[in-house]
Amino acid sequence: MAHFFKIDPAKPLSEREVEALFHSSTDGFIIGGTDQVTAENTAFYYERLMETDKQLFLEISHAEMVLPYADQFLVPMVLNSPDAKWVVGKFVEALREFSPHVPFKRITPLGYVILNAEAKAAKLTRANAALEKKDITAYAELAEHFLKLPVLYIEYSGTFGDTELVREAKAVLKETKLWYGGGIKSREQAAEMHEYADAIVVGNLIYENFEEALKTAEIVR
């Protein structure tokens, strides 16, 4: 079981807050965002966290986010988008331009299923968030048996998800890990979702209630 903090490069954090995150009980950090992400603000936070002995991932949603000195990259594939651009199209474009320089051994593909229709990522990718339990388990089986993805990421982004739905998805996975992100507002909610997911990702809470966000990392100890 694992806990990750997700840092949005476009949102400000004080030096004190960055230091507190650095020394928290979390297992690692994901740097990534949807809006106003640039090479400069991505590098700003990556360089402040790169000395950590915890896992540090750079989630690539924009080409300008790629830092040549980053060690681990996450590449999202939005499985429930009807637009193939957000599943494979973006990566084909990138490979056409950068293929000789792509560090494939340092890339982890994430199979995203976005379940909050109001989330920025859902609107951007036109993700079909009106899914039932059978749909979710089907996506889980697709991720594991057809696509052979290392991670299925259930994303509610801004609202707390259905724990029963997450449990159903986890029940059909054996090799693929299940990560959950979205709407965690307290240590108790973190513990509740952590019972079913292999990893939870806490992002917005960092900017809404910093001290409570730190407490969510304690559940994995």
Image (tube, rainbow, N blue to C red):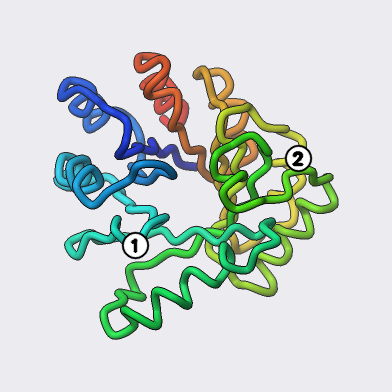
Image height check: is 51 above or below 86?
above
Read off the residue under disc 2.
165
Instruction: Please provide percent x and percent y for residue 190.
Output: 54, 26
Read off the residue under disc 1.
63
Q: Residues within 10 Å of mark 2 (few under 14, many from 20)?
A: some
| Res. 97 image quadrant | bottom left
Residue at image position (55%, 45%) is 121
Q: Which quadrant of the figure contains the C terminus?
A: top left
**Residue situated in front as seen by the camera: 42 or 1:** 42
Going by the numbered disc 2, the residue's amino acid type is Leu
Residue at image position (61%, 44%) is 123
Instruction: Please provide percent x and percent y for residue 74.
Output: 41, 58
Image height check: is 95 above or below 118?
below
**Residue situated in front as seen by the camera: 215 or 125:** 125
Instruction: Please provide percent x and percent y for residue 55.
Output: 31, 49
Earlier residue among tags 2 and 1 = 1
Instruction: Please provide percent x and percent y for residue 164.
Output: 76, 35
